[in-house]
């Protein structure tokens, strides 16, 4: 039976620590808790790493976090040769915050890229040092200097980034909200999580379950490392941190 883990990061992506209770250990040693701050790999964003501190103060290193049988079940995968906590044990969670914050900045940067390049999205992968978004676009029609300038304009404007929940019906009435060509947001749960940018979401809003920083200013300096041609109809944009290296 799949467990339902309370995903604390959905309401507050800035939680670095939390208490939780062990509810199950799966057949491969994965730890399942009643609640967690560890993001599970999904939507192109890698899962968190960190530690689970046991009641006796010893620590279990967590090497990966993923979904289980259902999206609601979150599995904390220990590094090799870690102790196994007891069922019902109270534990303290700590994520690798430095890494997660880089992922939150990068993930938000990917949203900004879809504002600057308003084409259907065919794929995306967020990483802490280099992210990519693939667009269905025969020819982007602009240079990486132009796209970088557009991104940095949004960063400097320091727009708020926030979550809004809408109903399946509201989403059905606004099909333009979905920019992804292949991935449809899950419907039927009653609520869709929209990631909104700008006052009244005037800059952008799209369904997303990931973690993002709370303002575009917090993304910081970014640039387009490369625009690659991936087939006749596809362009892959790579985002990196820092200013664009001089050519
Ligand atoms: Zn997102």
Image (spheres, rainbow, N blue to C red):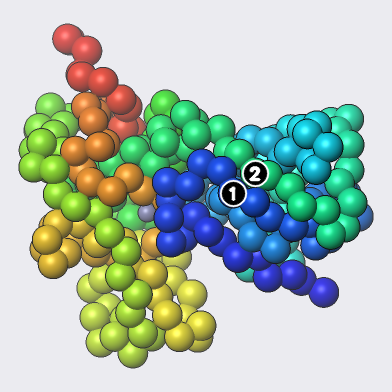
What residue is shown with label 2?
93
Q: Point out residue 170 in the picture as x, y percentages from the top left corner.
A: 29, 85
Q: Nearer the viewer, residue 153 or 90?
A: 90
Q: Point out residue 132 in the picture as x, y percentages from the top left corner.
A: 38, 38
Q: Residues within 10 Å of mark 1 (few under 14, many from 20)?
A: some
Q: Nearer the viewer, residue 54 or 129?
A: 54
Does residue 208 lie above or below 77 as drawn? below
Q: Residues within 10 Å of mark 2 (few under 14, many from 20)?
A: many
Q: CA distance from mark 1 to mark 2?
A: 5 Å
**Residue 102 visible in the shown view:** yes
**Quarter for ligand 1?**
bottom left
**Residue 134 visible in the shown view:** no
Q: Point out residue 106 in the picture as x, y percentages from the top left corner.
A: 36, 38
Q: Give the secondary structure at mark 1.
A: strand
Q: Please state if 63 lies on the left or on the right of 189 as rendered.
A: right
Q: Are marks 1 and 2 in contact (CB under 8 Å)?
A: yes
What residue is shown with label 1?
18
Q: Which residue in the rendered view is the most extreme toward the bottom?
A: 169
Give the label on residue 247, or none. none
């Amino acid at each position: 039976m799949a467990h339902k883990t309370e995903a604390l990061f959905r309401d507050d992506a800035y939680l670095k620590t939390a208490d939780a209770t062990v509810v199950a250990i799966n057949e491969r040693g994965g730890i399942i808790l009643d609640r967690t701050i560890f993001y599970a790999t999904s939507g192109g964003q890698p899962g968190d790493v960190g530690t689970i501190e046991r009641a006796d103060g010893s620590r279990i290193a967590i090497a990966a976090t993923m979904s289980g049988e259902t999206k609601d079940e979150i599995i904390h995968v220990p590094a090799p040769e870690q102790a196994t906590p007891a069922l019902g044990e109270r534990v303290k969670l700590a994520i690798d915050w430095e890494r997660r914050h880089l992922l939150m900045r990068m993930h938000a940067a990917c949203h900004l890229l879809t504002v600057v390049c308003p084409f259907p999205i065919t794929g995306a992968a967020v990483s802490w040092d280099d992210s990519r978004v693939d667009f269905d676009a025969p020819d982007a029609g602009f240079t990486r200097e132009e796209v970088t300038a557009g991104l940095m304009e949004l960063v400097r404007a320091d727009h708020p980034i926030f979550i809004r929940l809408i109903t399946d019906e509201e989403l059905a009435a606004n099909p333009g909200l979905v920019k992804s060509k292949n991935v449809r947001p899950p419907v039927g749960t009653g609520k869709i999580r929209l990631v909104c940018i700008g006052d009244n979401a005037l800059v952008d809003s799209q369904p997303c379950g990931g973690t993002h920083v709370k303002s575009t200013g917090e993304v910081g300096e970014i640039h387009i490392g490369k625009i690659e041609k991936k087939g006749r109809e596809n362009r892959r944009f790579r985002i990196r941190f820092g200013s664009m290296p001089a050519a």
